Every structure is written in structure tokens, then in C-alpha cells.
């Protein structure tokens, strides 16, 4: 809900309650005191109408899902304002003072005033409930944003861990290739050493045979 609308709404509820009290007290006054009180009431009605217009403009500027609820509340406030105007007209009419006293003594007028007070009480309760609902929605949204940020952080950490694992895998793969190459080199060196041993052995054998032959021919001759 719009905080601007809520501000106007609270101002109107307070003003409406004050006007209702002033209207009740005005019915018990006479002469200049009554005129002064009525003048104050009319000024308050003008302020109330200004607040109604501001709430109407603010409500119509909001999204449809919120606007419908606020306009429904606004219709109740307009009804309340019309009731206040009707009461003011009643006390400003001819013989209004005596008529108002008679009406206050009648149960019908008492019931009307009580119904108006009950209506304002229900409006205040509804406003408080809507404010609480708005607070819960804001809290849920804040929790959702925090959860989303936590999820993004976890995904980022997992991505970094995956990169580390891939780097480790590549390093191990490189070490394995080096080990394989070293093994091949050692195998080739071993083969060469074995081949060299055979060659050296053959050379030694040939030399021994040559020496034996030389000694043999020398002994014969």
C-alpha cells in the first residue's frame, strides 16, 4: 500500500473523529458560540474534502491490484464525510438547537451517532489490518530478496569450486602425462643399456677369441 495514501488516511480519520465531537458539542450551544463552532466545523469539512481528493488522486495513480482496494475504502470515507455534512446542515437549519436536542433524546439519533462511531471504529481497525498486511508483505519480500542473494552467493561459490576441481584435474592429468613420458624414457634407457651390454660382451668375446688364436698360431710356429 502507498505510504502517501496511508498518511492521508490517518489524517482523515483523526479529523473525522474531531469533527464528530465538535458537531455533537455544537448542538448544545446557542448564539455566537454556536456560530463560531459551526465555522470551525465547516473549515474542518473543507480540510476533509481536500484529504479525500488527495487520497483519490493517490489511489488512481497506483497499480490496479492496489487501486481497487483503496477506492473501496475511499467510498466509505466519502459516505462518512456526507454524513458529517448532513449533521452540519441539520444543526444550522432554523430552530436547529431545539431540534437537535430533541433528536439527541430520541433513540434514532443516538443510534445514528453510534453507528457512525462504529463505522469509524471499523475503518480504523481495517486500516490497521491493512497496514499489518503491508508490513508482512514487505517482510516477505525482504526475506525473498535475502534468500535470492544467498542462492546467488552459493552458486558463485559452487562455480569457483568447480573451477578449482577442473584446474586440479588438469594438473593431475599433466602429472600423469609426465609420469608416462618418464616411464617411456626409462624403458628406452633400459633397453639401450641391455643392448650395450650385449654389444660389449660380444666385443669382449671376439677379443678373447682373437687373443687365443694369436697365441695358438704363435705356439705352433
Image (cartoon, grey):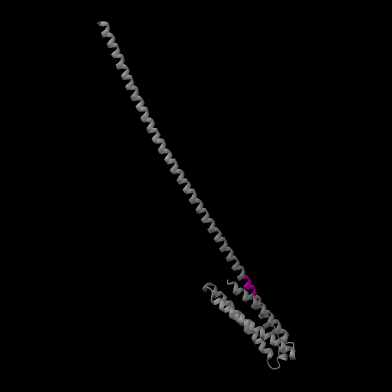
Closer to the camera, 179 or 76? 179
Q: Left or right? Give the position of 136 relative to 25.
A: left
Q: Residue at x 39, y 35 (%)?
A: 181
Please state the horizontal and vertical placement of residue 160, each as a whole percent of the image.
49, 50
Residue 109 % position (x, y): 69, 85
Residue 158 place in picture, x, y as percent:
50, 51
Q: Is residue 127 magenta?
A: yes
Residue 3 occupies which quadrant of the picture? bottom right
In the displayed image of the protein, which residue is found farthest to the bottom? 94
Report the predominant secondary structure element of the magenta stretch: helix
Q: Is residue 167 above or below residue 11?
A: above
Q: Quadrant of residue 14?
A: bottom right
Instruction: Give the left or right position of residue 62, taking residue 47 as reference.
Output: left
Give, as a single range, the part of the protein colored magenta.
Answer: 124-129
Q: Quadrant of the C terminus?
A: top left
The answer to which of 50 and 10 lies nearer the viewer is: 50
Amino acid at each position: 500500500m502507498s505510504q502517501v495514501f496511508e498518511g492521508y488516511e490517518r489524517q482523515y480519520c483523526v479529523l473525522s473523529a474531531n469533527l464528530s465531537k465538535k458537531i455533537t458539542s455544537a448542538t448544545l450551544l446557542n448564539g455566537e458560540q454556536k456560530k463560531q463552532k459551526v465555522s470551525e466545523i465547516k473549515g474542518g469539512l473543507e480540510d476533509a474534502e481536500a484529504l479525500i481528493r488527495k487520497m483519490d488522486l493517490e489511489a488512481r495513480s497506483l497499480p490496479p491490484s492496489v487501486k481497487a482496494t483503496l477506492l473501496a475504502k475511499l467510498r466509505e470515507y466519502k459516505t462518512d464525510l456526507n454524513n458529517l455534512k448532513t449533521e452540519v446542515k441539520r444543526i444550522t437549519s432554523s430552530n436547529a438547537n431545539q431540534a437537535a436536542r430533541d433528536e439527541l433524546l430520541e433513540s434514532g439519533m443516538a443510534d445514528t451517532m453510534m453507528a457512525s462511531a462504529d463505522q469509524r471504529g471499523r475503518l480504523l481497525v481495517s486500516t490497521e489490518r491493512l497496514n499489518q498486511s503491508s508490513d508482512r508483505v514487505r517482510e516477505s519480500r525482504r526475506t525473498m530478496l535475502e534468500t535470492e542473494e544467498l542462492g546467488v552467493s552459493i552458486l558463485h561459490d559452487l562455480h569457483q569450486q568447480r573451477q578449482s576441481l577442473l584446474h586440479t584435474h588438469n594438473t593431475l592429468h599433466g602429472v600423469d602425462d609426465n609420469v608416462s613420458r618418464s616411464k617411456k624414457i626409462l624403458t628406452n634407457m633400459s633397453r639401450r643399456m641391455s643392448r650395450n651390454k650385449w654389444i660389449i660382451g660380444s666385443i669382449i668375446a671376439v677379443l678373447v677369441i682373437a687373443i687365443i688364436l694369436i697365441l695358438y698360431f704363435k705356439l705352433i710356429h
